[in-house]
Image (tube, grey):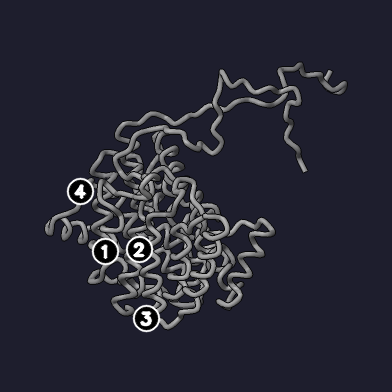
């Protein structure tokens, strides 16, 4: 295994550099898209509290808000929905690309590849005026759920179900995955999850998308980069790990003991804690409410009983609170989605936040190029091998 050389004589120079590992606490730009307020445990999209948006709006309205800065009126919403629904089509080539991927590849790899191919199909890839960027953002919003649904079907050995233009985005996704639209309460719970996952300031995947955009690359490349960052279990992939954990526990009566053992062994418990929130993720109460709705509708109370036991034990012992992935995982599982598809659903939502930030970055761009503090070998002289003389 290769070992990285670290200069043993290195002495930090605090007067010269203030290294912030993981950019923790570093403010690198301004944004009008969203704000996470750790002091009040609140999250706003363009000034609106996310919990109010989740209860009173559909996902399409929130997407418009993130793109345009204001909630749409009736006419604007109708035009926006028409544009999005007209983009609900995948080329045969794009479908074939997804179909030919190995059955063993993670759905996040399928979506990453599908979006990359989508960019190859867009002749306007280097056209980056505001109107075209908005149109591309809507194109991504419409087509990514189709890719996720296609991969969902193909991995089950089922045929692709064409989209319907008479359905909302959430309803159409259920139709394409399962061939039917579930109870309205389930659709609402899913829509709420998309709203809560849509945007979250300068998180890892959003920052990645902005870095790519800052080089004046295209929106598809920036989105593919965001998908790559979101795949990691310390970011979007945490919702999958939460459900794997719950399935491992399986019995609510053993959940507390499981958590106590995990804490004693200093294991990382996914779905708890957050870099920004210190007293609880502001999105959790709303998502927990709808996870409970899912348990009631599907008669799967076991998962919420495990949820309660794990949450109570973690808060009691460590004062660490759940983040959004903790209730989202079991909610998606009770909706009937395979665990591997939780993070691709996250992509469906977060593409709106990424696009909003991509457009914002482009509007006042400066290439993002941070510094690092060098801790390697001091400058030295190359000694050629005898054979090179």
Task: Answer with left or right where residue 77 lies relative to residue 26.
Answer: left
Identity of the residue drawn at 55% across and 64% down: 313
> Do tag 1 and tag 2 residues touch (Cβ < 8 Å)?
yes
Of the numbered discs 3 and 4, the one sitting upstream in the chain is: 4
Q: Residue at x 51, y 36 (%)?
A: 23
- Label 4: state its secondary structure: loop
Question: What's the CA distance linking mark 2 and mark 3?
Answer: 17 Å
Say which residue appears at 69% left-offset and 59% top-offset: 265
Q: Residue at x 26, y 59 (%)?
A: 60
Q: Which mark is residue 286?
A: 2
Q: Which disc is residue 371 wearing?
A: none
- Is residue 219 positioned above or below 27 on the image? below
Instruction: Tell which circle, 1 or 2, labels the residue nearer the N-terminal end.
Output: 1
Q: Position of residue 3 (x, y in %)?
A: 75, 38
Which residue is identified by label 4? 70
In what element is the residue under mark 2?
helix
Which image quarter holds the N terminus? top right
Q: Which residue is mark 3?
A: 297
* For residue 38, side relative to residue 7 (left or right): left
Residue 132 visible here: yes
Asked whether disc 3 touches disc 4, contact meaning CB atoms under 8 Å apart, the reply is: no
- Please tell me whether mark 2 or mark 3 is closer to you in this view: 2
Could you tell me how far apart the alpha carbons at marks 3 and 1 are, in whole angstroms?
18 Å
The image position of residue 378, as x and y in percent, is: 71, 19
Q: Which numbered disc flags the more N-terminal residue, 4 or 1?
A: 1
Q: Which residue is mark 1?
A: 55
């Amino acid at each position: 295994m290769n070992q990285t050389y670290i200069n043993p004589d290195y002495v930090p120079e605090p007067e010269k550099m203030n290294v912030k590992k993981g950019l923790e606490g570093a403010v690198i730009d301004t944004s009008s898209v969203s704000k996470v307020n750790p002091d009040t445990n609140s999250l706003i999209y363009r000034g609106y509290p996310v919990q109010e948006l989740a209860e009173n709006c559909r996902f399409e309205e929130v997407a418009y808000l993130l793109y345009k800065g204001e909630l749409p009126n009736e006419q604007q919403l109708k035009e926006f929905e028409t544009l999005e629904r007209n983009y609900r089509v995948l080329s045969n080539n794009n479908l074939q690309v997804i179909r030919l991927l190995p059955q063993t590849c993670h759905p996040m790899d399928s979506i990453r590849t599908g979006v990359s191919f989508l960019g190859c199909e867009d002749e306007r890839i280097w056209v980056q005026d505001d109107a075209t960027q908005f149109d591309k953002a809507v194109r991504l919003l419409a087509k990514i759920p189709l890719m996720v649904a296609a991969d969902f079907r193909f991995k089950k050995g089922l045929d692709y179900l064409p989209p319907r233009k008479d359905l909302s985005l959430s309803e159409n996704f259920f139709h394409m995955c399962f061939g039917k639209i579930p109870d309205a309460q389930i659709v609402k719970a899913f829509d709420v999850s998309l709203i809560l996952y849509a945007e979250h300031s300068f998180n890892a995947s959003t920052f990645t998308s902005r870095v790519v955009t800052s080089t004046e690359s295209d929106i598809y490349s920036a989105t593919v980069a965001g998908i790559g960052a979101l795949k990691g279990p310390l970011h979007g992939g945490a919702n999958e790990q939460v459900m794997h954990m719950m399935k491992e526990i399986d019995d609510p009566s053993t959940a507390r003991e499981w958590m106590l053992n995990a804490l004693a062994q200093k294991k990382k418990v996914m779905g708890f804690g957050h870099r920004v929130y210190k007293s609880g993720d502001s999105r959790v109460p709303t998502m927990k409410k709808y996870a409970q709705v899912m348990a009631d509708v599907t008669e799967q109370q076991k998962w919420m009983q495990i949820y309660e036991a794990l949450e109570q034990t973690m808060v009691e012992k460590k004062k660490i609170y759940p983040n959004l992935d903790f209730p989202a995982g079991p909610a998606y599982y009770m909706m009937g989605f395979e665990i591997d598809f939780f993070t691709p659903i996250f992509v469906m939502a977060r593409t709106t936040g990424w696009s909003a930030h991509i457009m914002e970055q482009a509007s006042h761009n400066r290439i993002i190029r941070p510094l690092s503090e060098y801790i390697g070998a001091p400058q030295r002289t190359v000694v050629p091998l005898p054979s090179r003389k």
